Image (tube, rainbow, N blue to C red):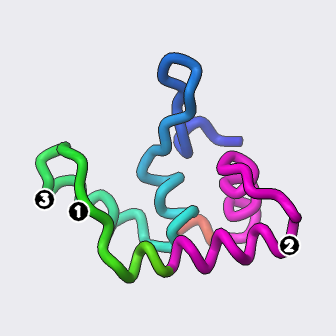
């Protein structure tokens, strides 16, 4: 798995912009733009992003029977075009 999807901080995975893009099904440019608007502070996800992420989570769970985040990253990375 590509390290740009997440990084480990004190042994815990922290999702990067590419990982968020895959989990939520939102173009990475949109995530980067929202992050820039928030000046690097935590920001609230738009409702449509949350809905998309829930849909993708359910799809991953139905396909694999698993609920782990890192597994979902691998699943979506294998299925999404590079430009997402």
Question: Residue 73 lies in magenta, yes or no?
Answer: yes
Please tell me in which quadrant of the rendered image residue 45 appears: bottom left
Q: Residues within 10 Å of mark 1 (few under 14, many from 20)?
A: some
Q: Answer yes or no: do the residues labelled 1 and 3 have beta carbons within 8 Å?
A: yes
Query: Could you tell me how many numbered marks the image carries?
Result: 3
Check residue 49 for magenta coloring: no
SS at badge 3: helix
Determine which of the numbered discs, if any, sits on residue 37 in the image.
3
- Callout 2: SS: helix
Q: Residue at x 23, y 56 (%)?
A: 43
Which residue: 54% across, 39% down?
6
Q: Residue furthest top?
A: 10
Considering only order in the chain, which callout, 1 or 2, is on the residue closer to the N terminus? 1
Highlighted magenta segment, given as a residue range: 52-80
In the rendered image, residue 71, in percent from the top left (x then y), is placed at 75, 51
The residue closer to the viewer here, 5 or 45, is: 45
Estimate the x, y position of residue 27 in percent, counting from the top left: 43, 71
Q: Nearer the viewer, residue 72 or 2?
A: 72
Task: Please state which of residues 21 and 46 is positioned toward the viewer in this rendering.
Answer: 46
Q: Residue 65 or 21: which is nearer the viewer?
A: 65
Q: Residues within 10 Å of mark 2 (few under 14, many from 20)?
A: few
Q: Secondary structure at mark 1?
A: helix
């Amino acid at each position: 798995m590509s390290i740009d999807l997440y990084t480990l901080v004190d042994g815990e995975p922290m999702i990067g912009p590419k990982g968020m893009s895959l989990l939520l099904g939102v173009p990475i440019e949109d995530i980067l733009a929202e992050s820039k608007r928030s000046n690097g502070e935590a920001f609230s996800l738009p409702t449509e992003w949350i809905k998309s992420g829930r849909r993708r989570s359910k799809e991953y769970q139905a396909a694999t029977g698993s609920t782990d985040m890192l597994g979902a990253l691998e699943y979506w990375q294998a299925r999404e075009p590079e430009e997402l």
